[in-house]
Amino acid sequence: MDKPRSAFLQAAAERGFIHQCTDLGALDHLFTEETVTAYIGFDATADSLHVGSLVPIMLLRLLQQTGHKPVVLMGGGTTKVGDPSGKDEQRRLLGDADITANIRGIQSVFTKYVSFGDGACDAAMVNNADWLDGLAYISFLRDYGRHFSINRMLSFDSVKLRLDREQPLSFLEFNYMVLQSYDFLELSRRNGCRLQMGGSDQWGNIVSGIDLARRLDQTTLFGLTTPLLTTATGAKMGKTADGAVWLNADRLSAYDYWQYWRNTHDDDVGRFLKLFTELPLDEIAHLEKLDGAEINEAKKILANEATKLCHGADATRAASDTASKTFDDGGIGNDLPSIDVPQAELNDGVLAYELLRRANLAASNGEARRLIKGGGGRVNDAKIANDKAIINSSYINAEGIIKISAGKKKHAIVRPV
RNA sequence: GGAGGGGUGCCUGAGUGGUUAAAAGGGACGGGCUGUAAACCCGUUGACUAUGUCUACGUUGGUUCGAAUCCAACCCCCUCCA
């Protein structure tokens, strides 16, 4: 296929958003002809989305910026079923209360990336519980179920992988695909939605929705998937030891979010700049060519741009200042996580390992002690000599605080109160 | 419903009465080298008021001086048959 002509697909292709498309030529034509409504579904399995969902989110943003209408589908109904794609085990079943709370948390993320409203290009948010919850079993089976072939469903990766590995797959989960297909049909009828986008693991689900609409309504719908991002070391995007890289500030601070991007692997910098920032491509081309230590500058730009989108300019500046003070000058930045410790307690002295644990630099006292024994515990940048060391007020520095660290990257501030 | 196999730490997976807080690998974390990178080398990887105590091999009971290991019942999963 030649280069797409529509602004949206052209940018999406150049920036690395496109993995597969059902009919790129026809879709491109559609995009040049009219304002296209496209949707992506998000399941409400947690009260925040994490970096793993950022590719689809950025794609919706791009869609809106190129003059089209994004629809965010919240999976209030499908979350009750659980998507088996990419999962070895059945997900924990969530109740209505959890799902409602999760949707609220997730909504707040989207308002940062796309603008909602009633205009032609304003984003809309819908919840598939609105039409799924009320379905009547028998009539649904007769009207829609007969269009699904079990033979075909069994051949989809989401199902096949489970079966091949002899992992359990319940009938409940098996129906996820059917419901997602029905979602697409429903959105095409209600919102005039022509395109569903999603991660590459959603391909089967998307395609079967397209089939359903063709059979029932004789409409032509399109599917577009984004590549499943892995880092250069092969790990899935968005997971660290401390858990997922959340997009909600109350789950993960702007500083930690900034750090996540700052620690991007060299080989990922160019790719990530294209996907997660809105810098012009020629500028990115220049940045990703930087060699050796210079690539750190590109990483800082990546961190700044990505954090700005998620947490705003002020929080980004604070995170970036803190990072430069902490790492470049070996000092202490204001944005580091901090804990309060009563002055009286510090006068008596507190065990160093306990302080590390309280500052969340270690999960347990035992872990903190191991850290110290391994040479990774620091107070005011000096190694803690032994695991029974005591920290007292004499460690308070000129700024009236104590800096404690686990390794070279994780720091926290102890504030006497 | 019947027959067989299985459920072990973050994950994979060994262990089939005592030296088993449980092999090995992965992951993660820390140290070294660096650029807050990768690769590589070394170390750590249940908790605690810590030469000890407690918790842990699906659940609950039992046998035994002693159980992840043996027995019983139950729960769950897989395969085949109906």
Image (spheres, coloured by chain):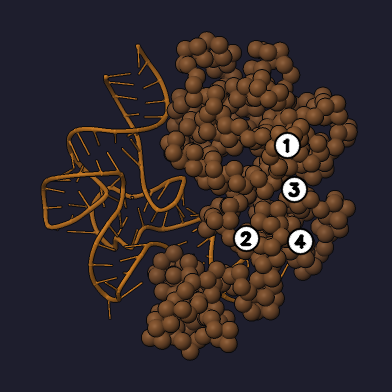
Chain colours: A brown, B orange
User: Which label's residue is closer to the chain start, 2 or 4?
Assistant: 2
- Residues flagged by tags 2 and 4 on a common chain: yes
The reply to whether residue A122 is in sight is yes
Q: Which residue is mark 3?
A: A275
Query: A149 or A78: which is nearer to us?
Result: A78
Gap between marks 1 and 4, in whole Å? 29 Å
- Residue at 52%, 58% in the rendered image: A242
Foreground mark, 2 or 3, reads 2
The disc labelled 4 sits on which kind of residue? Ile
- Residues flagged by tags 1 and 2 on a common chain: yes
| Chain ID of residue with mark 2 | A
The reply to whether residue A159 is in sight is no
Foreground mark, 1 or 2, reads 1
User: Which label's residue is closer to the chain start, 1 or 3?
Assistant: 1
Q: Which residue is mark 1?
A: A122
| Chain ID of residue with mark 1 | A
Q: Which residue is mark 2?
A: A254
Mark 1, Cα crowd under 10 Å, few <14 / some 14-19 / many 20+, is some
Q: Secondary structure at mark 3?
A: helix
Q: Secondary structure at mark 4?
A: helix
- Residue at 46%, 78% in the rendered image: A417
Gap between marks 2 and 4, in whole Å? 15 Å
